[in-house]
Image (cartoon, rainbow, N blue to C red):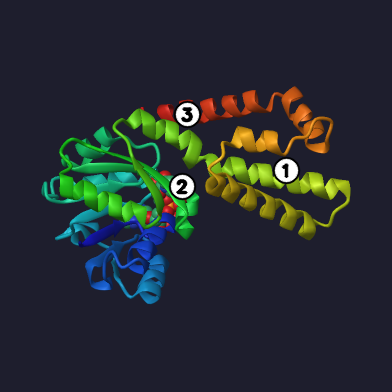
Amino acid sequence: MKIAFIGGGNMGEAMLSAVLGKHLATIQSVIASDSSPERRQYLTSKYGIAVIDDNRKTVAGADVIVLAIKPQNLAEVMAELNGLLGPEQLVLSIIAGVRLDTICQGLGHRAVVRAMPNTPAQIGQGMTVWTATEEVSEQQNEWAGSILSVMGHEIAVSSEDQIDMATAISGSGPAYLFLFVEALVNAAVQLGLSHDMAQELVLTTVLGSGHLIEESGIEPAELRRMVTSPGGTTAEALREFEQGEFSELLTRAVRAAYERAKQLGS
Ligand SMILES: NC(=O)c1ccc[n+]([C@@H]2O[C@H](COP(=O)([O-])OP(=O)(O)OC[C@H]3O[C@@H](n4cnc5c(N)ncnc54)[C@H](OP(=O)(O)O)[C@@H]3O)[C@@H](O)[C@H]2O)c1
């Protein structure tokens, strides 16, 4: 499979690094373009792939064209590539908030996948939710699934509304967790622990608890009940969470992200 990356920034690099690292493609079958000379030099010297400053040449002969540019650069790229692609070529966009219709119209091309990865994809632990136009063939769907799975988990959905919902959960979710970790570390420091120790306690607790949910197969609500003895310390803390309407706050935050995702795509 020949893969062309338009944009070799954070996410483009994460994808091409995973594609090469997991031997989905060879360095000869991957090409990238980037408008930044420093970026081009960096990617060529690190990965040994061709990185050029010509989007039209980059997509020539590619099976899959990954769009990994920022939304503000999309219009110029679509104008450059309009009418250039054949139906056998798949466009895989990871650009947040840009709908399939916009890409199809801008490129004059129908075989398009829209994917929403998240930041842990950069270390192969990502969650990507994606959807495809009707014109995407079975083989192209397989290409998309295999490219996205090298960055972690992937789930194909049938509507873009589910992409907006996933954006509010897995897309923005890492930031919710970073905030929780930050706040818990601060609370630990306020109790009197050193910052280093607080960070270690919190990180180990978060990671260990996540693995426990996954490996035990027990529902999180049940695991919570199991560590909450009546009259104990956890019960005291959870009562405070409840009084502060923690669950309602999270629901409001997720809803706000979802509404914003819909608005960005309209
Ligand atoms: N980071 C994430 O976790 C994440 C998660 C989900 C989705 N996404 C999406 O992924 C996309 C890329 O994000 P990113 O964080 O990788 O951005 P980024 O680091 O800014 O990378 C974009 C790269 O594209 C280059 N570029 C700009 N215009 C170009 C053009 N016309 N032709 C070729 N290359 C061009 C940029 O060069 P210059 O610096 O010279 O402009 C930059 O190196 C975004 O649309 C974002 O919504 C990112």
Percent across and percent down for residue 169 are 50, 36
Q: If the image is split into quadrants, where does the N terminus sit?
A: bottom left
* Residue 184 image-quadrant placement: top right
Q: Please tell me whether mark 2 sits on a helix, a strand or a loop.
A: loop
- The disc labelled 3 sits on which kind of residue? Tyr
Q: In this view, does 43 lie above or below 251?
A: below
Percent across and percent down for residue 129 are 38, 41
* Residue 41 image-quadrant placement: bottom left
Q: Please tell me whether mark 3 sits on a helix, a strand or a loop.
A: helix
Task: Choose between 242 and 105: the one closer to the eye.
Answer: 242
Q: Is residue 119 left or right of residue 238?
A: left
Please tell me which residue is depicted at 76% across the width and 23% down the height of the picture.
243
Report crowding for label 1: few under 14, some 14 to 19, many 20 or more residues within 10 A (C-alpha). few
- The disc labelled 1 sits on which kind of residue? Ala
* Residue designated by label 1: 183
* Residue designated by label 3: 258
Q: Is residue 235 left or right of residue 31?
A: right
Tag 2–tag 1 contact (CB < 8 Å):
no
Query: Does mark 2's beta carbon lie closer than 8 Å to ligand 1?
Result: yes
* Residue designated by label 2: 118
